[in-house]
Image: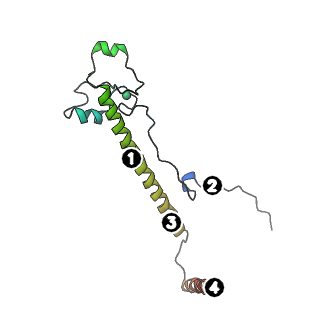
């Protein structure tokens, strides 16, 4: 009678565990002005050079103070990029971009938590595969009434 094999339970994925608070992806660039590429990001260049078109205009070198990327000398010699961005400008772009990403990841985190709450409540709701019969419904109501009477 008690011959069933004993199996190990398989946990739900981490994000589906109750109370999961996981953190949304957050960029880890050291320099937000160039995303550690050495060139100021396109949308940031556009803030300063509104008519800038990538592929038609020369890329802009990042000069942010905290930037670790130094472009090779060969690039300077070929004069393929603009030197126009000052450290001051890049620092401002860096800090704006960092703030933008902070807000973005906070928003993502909130959306994620809401989504998980929704999934949780849908799972609970969908566990019942068919509607209750009249008898079952009466039984449930009676039990609810009993519980209320106990209070
Ligand atoms: Zn940079």
Q: Which of marks 2 and 3 is nearer the N terminus?
A: 2
Name the quarter where the C terminus is drawn: bottom right
Q: Which residue is most to the left?
A: 51
- Residue 36: percent from the left, percent from the top? 40, 29
- The 10 Å Cα crowd at callout 3, few under 14, some 14 to 19, many 20 or more, is few
State yes or no: discs 2 and 3 in contact (Cβ < 8 Å).
no
Q: Which residue is most to the front?
A: 88
Answer above or below: position of 39 versus 109: above
- The 10 Å Cα crowd at callout 4, few under 14, some 14 to 19, many 20 or more, is few
**Mark pair 1, 4: CA separation:** 49 Å
Answer above or below: position of 109 versus 53: below
Q: How is the image coloured?
A: rainbow
* Beta carbon of the mark 1 residue lies under 8 A of ligand 1: no
Q: Quadrant of ligand 1?
A: top left
- The 10 Å Cα crowd at callout 2, few under 14, some 14 to 19, many 20 or more, is few
According to the picture, the residue beneath numbered tag 3 turns out to be 121
- Residue 100: percent from the left, percent from the top? 36, 43
């Amino acid at each position: 009678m008690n011959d069933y094999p004993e199996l190990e339970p398989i946990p739900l994925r981490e994000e589906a565990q109750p109370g999961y608070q996981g953190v949304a992806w957050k960029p880890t660039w050291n320099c937000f002005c160039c995303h550690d590429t050495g060139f100021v990001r396109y949308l940031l260049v556009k803030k300063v050079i509104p008519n800038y078109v990538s592929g038609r205009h020369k890329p802009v070198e990042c000069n942010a103070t905290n930037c670790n990327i130094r472009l090779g000398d060969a690039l300077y010699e070929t004069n393929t990029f603009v030197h126009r961005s000052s450290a001051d400008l890049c620092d401002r772009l860096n800090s704006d971009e960092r703030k933008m990403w902070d807000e973005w990841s906070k928003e993502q985190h909130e959306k994620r938590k809401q989504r998980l709450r929704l999934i949780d409540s849908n799972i609970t709701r969908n566990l019942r595969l068919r509607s209750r019969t009249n008898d079952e419904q009466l039984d449930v109501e009676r039990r609810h009434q009993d519980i209320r009477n106990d209070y």
